[in-house]
Image (tube, rainbow, N blue to C red):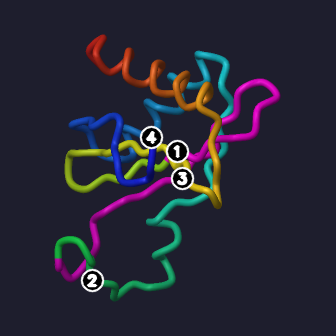
């Protein structure tokens, strides 16, 4: 899977989607670590127009989580949100490889929970 293919799309604001994902992953014995938060990073840049929507103030949010399971190297989960929608991406590139089993397990936990009616 590449960084350009969302595997889950939630009709929820990003902050809610991130909290939900962390809860579901940790309930399934994954460990998570937040490594980036766009809103926190933008605090030093108050006059920053949104590159996606052209608005004067960017209302997008992006959070990067490292997701660990047992002794496997982590997988990078990116959650990007705008308005009331959040997109989930797993990063698997030559520069940042991800194990297929870990990707599959993460997708199963988040996809099954989503279809169960969050």
Left or right: 62, with 30 as reference point: left
Marker disc for residue 49: 2
- Whichever of callouts 2 and 1 sits on the residue coming sooner in the sequence is 2
Span shown in magenta: 54-77
Query: Which residue does the image show at 49% across and 43% down from the upper left?
Result: 90
Q: Give x and y (percent) for residue 8.
A: 33, 34
Does the magenta segment cover residue 4? Answer: no
Cα distance, mark 3 to mark 2? 21 Å
Between disc 2 and disc 4, whose residue precedes?
4
**Location of residue 80 with respect to 57 vertically, above or below:** above
Q: Residue at position x 59%, y 17% from top?
A: 27
Q: Give the position of the N terminus as an image quadrant.
A: top left
In the image, 57 versus 36, the foreground residue is 36
- Give the foreground label among 1 and 4: 1
What residue is disc 4 on? 18
Q: In the rendered image, which residue does mark 1 sit on?
A: 77
Dot 2: within a 10 Å radius of its alpha carbon, few (fewer than 14), some, or many (20 or more) residues? some
Q: CA distance from mark 2 to mark 1?
A: 25 Å
Would residue 118 appear left or right of 104 to someone viewing this image?
A: left
Secondary structure state at the residue bearing disc 3: strand
Question: Marks 1 and 4: CB-CB under 8 Å?
Answer: no
Q: Earlier in the sequence, mark 1 or mark 3?
A: 3
- Indicate the secondary structure of the residue bearing disc 1: strand
**Mark 4 / mark 3, whichever is N-terminal:** 4
For mark 3, what is the residue? Answer: 64
Q: Are marks 3 and 2 in contact (CB under 8 Å)?
A: no
Residue situated in front as seen by the camera: 57 or 86: 86
Given contact means CB atoms under 8 Å apart, are the residues at marks 1 and 3 in contact?
A: yes
Which residue appears at 46% of the width and 36% of the height?
19
Q: Residue furthest bottom?
A: 47
């Amino acid at each position: 899977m590449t960084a350009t293919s969302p595997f889950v799309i939630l009709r929820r604001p990003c902050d809610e989607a991130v909290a939900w994902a962390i809860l579901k992953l940790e309930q399934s014995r994954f460990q998570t670590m937040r490594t980036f938060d766009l809103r926190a990073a933008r605090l030093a840049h108050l006059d920053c127009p949104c590159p996606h929507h052209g608005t004067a103030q960017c209302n997008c949010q992006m959070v990067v989580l490292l997701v660990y399971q047992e002794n496997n190297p982590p997988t990078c989960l990116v959650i990007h949100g705008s308005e009331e929608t959040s997109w989930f991406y797993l990063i698997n590139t030559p520069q940042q490889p991800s194990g297929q089993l870990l990707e599959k397990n993460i997708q199963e936990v988040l996809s099954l929970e989503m279809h169960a009616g969050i």
